[in-house]
Amino acid sequence: MARILVVDDERSVRLTFSQILKNHGHDVWMAEGTPEAMQTLSQHEIDVMVSDIFMPGQNGLDLMSIVSKEAPNVVVVLVTGAPTVETAIQALRGGALEYLCKPVSPEELIKAVEEGVDAKQYRDRNQHCADHREVQDKAVELVFGRCEHGNGQKGGCIHCTLAVLRRVAEAYKEEGIPAQEHKNWGQPCAPEFH
């Protein structure tokens, strides 16, 4: 189940798209134009926005541009009843995942939204991994610091790493935390690393 925002100035299109998406288990919000769409985006975490291109005031391309700056995790699917090569190029260059031409069949709409949900999950996973790597890098530097042997290596060389591990083992012993039973616990793994 995904959270979908349908933006179209035509009430009948909003209602039709909304019903199709709800029938496939999605939560759906509707907006008549850019101001209402931005208000919805500020109040709800939306996965995919399906927007008409030609609307009074700011069009769907303008809305997509605003969304890419203010809600960059939202995947955009654009729909138009007056397709042109120019708007198709603008839509895809602007970051739209899909450019659909009206009339849109229920199958086309569901397929585009499901591809949008997959794209969002992929983006979210990549962002999570990037955030996780950043946290790991900071943790390594906090725990191990920079190499004390002058090479400036981030995370320390093997000598520094073993020294930190020895300090951790000593802290465990001081706190009375039982160590794993191992014949080399707390000892360097090889004499050449002294």
Image: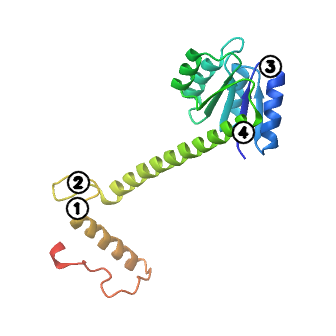
Q: Which quarter of the picture shows residue 177?
A: bottom left
User: In the rendered view, would you say 123 is above or below 17?
Assistant: below
- 174 or 132: nearer the viewer: 132
| Alpha-carbon span between mark 2 and mark 1 | 7 Å
Q: Which residue is mark 3?
A: 10
User: In the rendered view, would you say 152 is above or below 100?
Assistant: below
| Alpha-carbon span between mark 4 and mark 2 | 51 Å
Q: Say which residue appears at 69% left-offset and 11% top-offset.
A: 57
- Of callouts 1 and 4, which one flags the residue occurring earlier in the amino acid sequence? 4
Q: Which residue is mark 4?
A: 110
Q: Nearer the viewer, mark 1 or mark 4?
A: 4
Three-letter code, disc 3 = Glu
Secondary structure at badge 2 equals: loop
Q: Residues within 10 Å of mark 2 (few under 14, many from 20)?
A: few
Q: Which residue is mark 2?
A: 153
Q: Say which residue appears at 37% left-offset and 73% top-offset.
A: 171
Q: Say which residue appears at 30% left-offset and 84% top-offset.
A: 184
Mark 2 in CB contact with mark 1 (< 8 angstroms): yes
Three-letter code, disc 4 = Ile
> Which x, y percent locates residue 86?
56, 15
Q: Which residue is mark 1?
A: 157
